[in-house]
């Protein structure tokens, strides 16, 4: 066992023993080679079923990175370009002044359509055609390309419908054929997860409420953009994430994955993994270079995006770690790659927390250990 594996294993066991986490996975690749595969805790507190390396977790937005990766694969093959208007592939999307919105603007969250109808229900989220029709009927919140704001739900449907119109295949099928299958993780990463496979999932639970966070939420004015972008009933919670219909549906702004599967995907963007490289080095450079930055028009914080991946490593600013690209998920999961260090990292967990404290701790630990060359046994 190398020291990085040992130290990560000790860290996550400590988090479970202390009660901070319930079940957790961490996977790390370095220059295309597996370095860490650590697991701890229980996948299902009701039965005591333990976390395994191949246990998928519903991690909400963490799998946006896979949706973006599929778009890059198709750009590599010439099916469309980043500056292709969405409406050229999906004509209905051009309604209400959206004719000029490009695929690049969707990927970097500057498209100006972050909102879904405020009467959207969980059942609606599972109805692909209904959601796509609603998004096509959206009005712009800002002139595309001039501002940035997180497209929490709409990102997945827009990318997914562009993919479907361009290929004739659902994005879930392309995930299996183009990413999961070649990388040998077909049963570990999904958008929609078949009902027959759902007993393998980790069950989510909400972290104990944070009184300070609750007070801050209660004090927020009701007319904030974040409250107009989606109904509060669809904010990520354990209850929403454990619903069988939500789990089975293609909602590619989120997904189910093991840490190993998502880390393996980022590794295969950076380097060949068992002779599989997902996109060309030239495509990787364009896809992971800073594309749009500014104050997030939905959530208010500073934000920096490449094409489908946020820029910056947890515990470090985008300015200080511009070569790191990835996506975190509500609840505290996180996955990223780094073109400079060759690190690909995935962390999945089933306690839905309000911050990235656990992921930040593990990302910093891995980077510190690899920075001093502490990889004996390899």
Image (tube, rainbow, N blue to C red):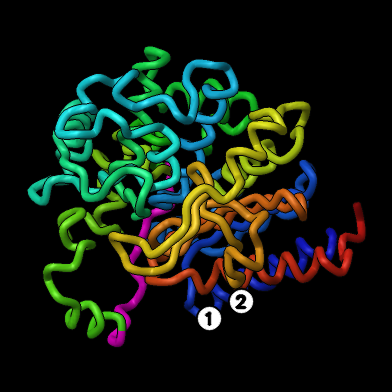
The image quadrant that residue 362 belongs to is bottom right
The image quadrant that residue 206 belongs to is bottom left
Is 200 located above or below residue 147 in the figure?
above
x and y percent of residue 159 in the render? 38, 32
* Secondary structure of residue under mark 1: loop
Say left or right for 201 vs 336.
Answer: left
Q: Is residue 70 visible?
A: yes
- Looking at the rendering, in which quadrant would you find the N terminus? bottom right
Point out the stretch of residues depicted in magenta. 200-212
The image quadrant that residue 236 belongs to is bottom left
x and y percent of residue 214 in the render? 24, 80
Q: Residue at x 45, y 36 (%)?
A: 104
Q: Main secondary structure of the magenta part?
A: loop
Is 196 located above or below residue 163 in the figure?
below
Is 305 magenta? The answer is no
- Residue, disc 2: 14
Question: Quick one: 57 or 134, which is closer to the camera?
Answer: 134
Is 220 located above or below residue 294 in the figure?
below
* Secondary structure of residue under mark 2: helix
- Mark 2 to mark 1 CA distance (whole Å): 6 Å
Label 2: how many Cα within 10 Å (few below 14, some 14–19, many 20+): some
Q: Which mark is residue 18?
A: 1
């Amino acid at each position: 066992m190398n020291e990085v594996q040992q130290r990560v294993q000790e860290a996550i066991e400590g988090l479970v023993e202390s009660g901070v986490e319930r079940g957790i996975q961490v996977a790390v690749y370095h220059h295309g080679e597996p370095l860490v595969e650590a697991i701890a805790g229980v996948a299902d507190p009701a039965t005591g079923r333990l976390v395994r390396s191949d246990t998928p977790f519903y991690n909400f937005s963490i799998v946006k990175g896979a949706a973006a990766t599929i778009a890059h694969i198709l750009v590599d093959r010439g099916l469309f370009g980043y500056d292709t208007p969405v409406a050229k592939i999906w004509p209905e999307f051009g309604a209400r002044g959206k004719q000029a919105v490009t695929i690049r603007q969707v990927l970097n969250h500057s498209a100006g359509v972050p909102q879904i109808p405020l009467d959207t229900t969980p059942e609606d989220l599972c109805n692909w055609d209904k959601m796509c029709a609603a998004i096509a009927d959206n009005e712009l919140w800002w002139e595309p390309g001039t501002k940035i704001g997180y497209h929490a739900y709409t990102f997945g449907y827009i990318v997914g419908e562009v993919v479907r119109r361009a290929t004739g295949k659902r994005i879930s099928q392309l995930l299996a054929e183009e990413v999961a299958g070649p990388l040998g993780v077909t049963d570990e990463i999904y958008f929609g997860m078949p009902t027959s496979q759902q007993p393998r999932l980790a069950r989510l639970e909400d972290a104990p409420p944070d009184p300070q966070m609750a007070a801050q939420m209660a004090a927020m004015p009701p007319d904030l953009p974040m409250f107009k972008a989606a109904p509060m009933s669809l904010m990520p919670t354990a209850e929403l994430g454990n619903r069988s219909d939500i789990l089975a549906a293609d909602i590619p702004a989120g997904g189910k994955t093991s840490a190993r599967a998502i880390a393996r995907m980022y590794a295969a963007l950076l380097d060949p993994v068992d002779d599989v490289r997902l996109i060309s080095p030239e495509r990787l450079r364009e896809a992971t270079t800073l594309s749009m930055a500014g104050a997030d028009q939905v959530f208010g914080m500073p934000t920096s995006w490449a094409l489908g991946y946020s820029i910056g490593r947890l515990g470090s600013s985008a300015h200080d770690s511009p070569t790191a690209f990835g996506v975190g998920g509500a609840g505290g999961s996180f996955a990223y790659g780094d073109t400079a260090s060759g690190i690909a990292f995935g962390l999945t967990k089933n306690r839905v927390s309000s911050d990235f404290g656990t992921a930040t701790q593990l990302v910093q630990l891995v980077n510190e250990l690899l920075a001093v060359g502490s990889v004996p046994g390899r």
